[in-house]
Image (cartoon, grey):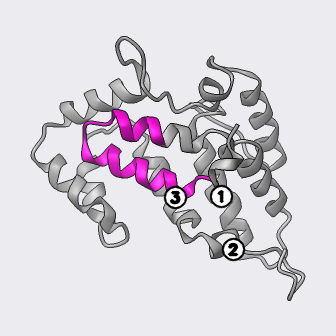
Amino acid sequence: MDPATGQAADPAAARPWRASSHLRLVATLLAMPAEGALEALREVLPQAPWLAEAVGELESLPLEHWQAEHTRLFINGYPETPCPPFESAYRQGRMGGPCAGDLQGLYRRAGLQTSGAPADYLGTLLECAAYLGGLCHDRGQCPAAELLAELWESHLNHWLSRFASDLGGAARLKLYQVLAGQLVLLGPEPAHES
């Protein structure tokens, strides 16, 4: 809440990397790359120059190499997956833990529902944060501000920095190394994690 105006503070104002468009881009980078993914990255370079070196590297690699790295990091690494992008895996040590149910409730209260991805998938959380942040940006007093704060304070702030650190340490491709850096910017001060 902005004490001067009595209106909900714009959550992206203090941390511009939490702007809706940036959150959506970061969420998209977590998805499995498909045909056209490299071209899509080239198109966002003017808004995301931090991707330039990664795009240069990807231009020299076949799509299958990028897809294999994505699979190794996020889906099925051997002997273990280095950084599964799911809150329950980080906070409860298993997939589909209670936080997934808590997030389903938060999404319902926001008028949203998940489709195709688990509720605690990082891409889903970031898309929700982008949506709620967009509502708060478009309106002065924002009823979504409380939900947005809950999403960050009760969920993302508790594991995002650890995920980013794991990703940065395990990533072989520049894309995922710079993604880890962007996730670090989104995360809380270290004292908030548990």
* Residue stretch in magenta: 165-188
Question: Which of these two is toward me, 78 or 147?
Answer: 78
| Label 1, label 3: how far apart the Cα atoms are | 19 Å
Residue designated by label 3: 185
What's under tag 1, amino acid-wise? Tyr
Which numbered disc flags the more N-terminal residue, 2 or 3? Answer: 2
In the displayed structure image, the side of residue 125 where residue 75 appears, left or right: left
Query: For residue 107: magenta?
Result: no
In the displayed structure image, the side of residue 163 where residue 94 appears, left or right: right
Circle 3 SS class: helix
The quadrant where residue 6 appears: bottom right
Cβ atoms under marks 1 and 3 closer than 8 Å: no
The quadrant where residue 9 appears: bottom right
Q: Position of residue 79 (x, y in %)?
A: 37, 11
Q: Position of residue 108 (x, y in %)?
A: 81, 42
Q: Is residue 111 visible?
A: yes
Picture residue at 65% right of the left edge, 26% below the top: 88
Residue designated by label 1: 131
Q: Residue furthest front?
A: 191
Q: Can you say whether 141 is above or below 30 in the image? A: below
| Label 1, label 2: how far apart the Cα atoms are | 10 Å
Which numbered disc flags the more N-terminal residue, 1 or 3? Answer: 1
Q: How many marks?
A: 3
Circle 1 SS class: helix
Q: Can you say whether 128 is above or below 11 in the image? A: above
Cβ atoms under marks 2 and 3 closer than 8 Å: no
Residue 137, numbered label: 2
Question: Which of these two is toward me, 138 or 146?
Answer: 146
Q: Quadrant of the C terminus?
A: top right
Circle 2 SS class: helix
Picture residue at 24% right of the left edge, 36% below the top: 66
What's under tag 2, amino acid-wise? His
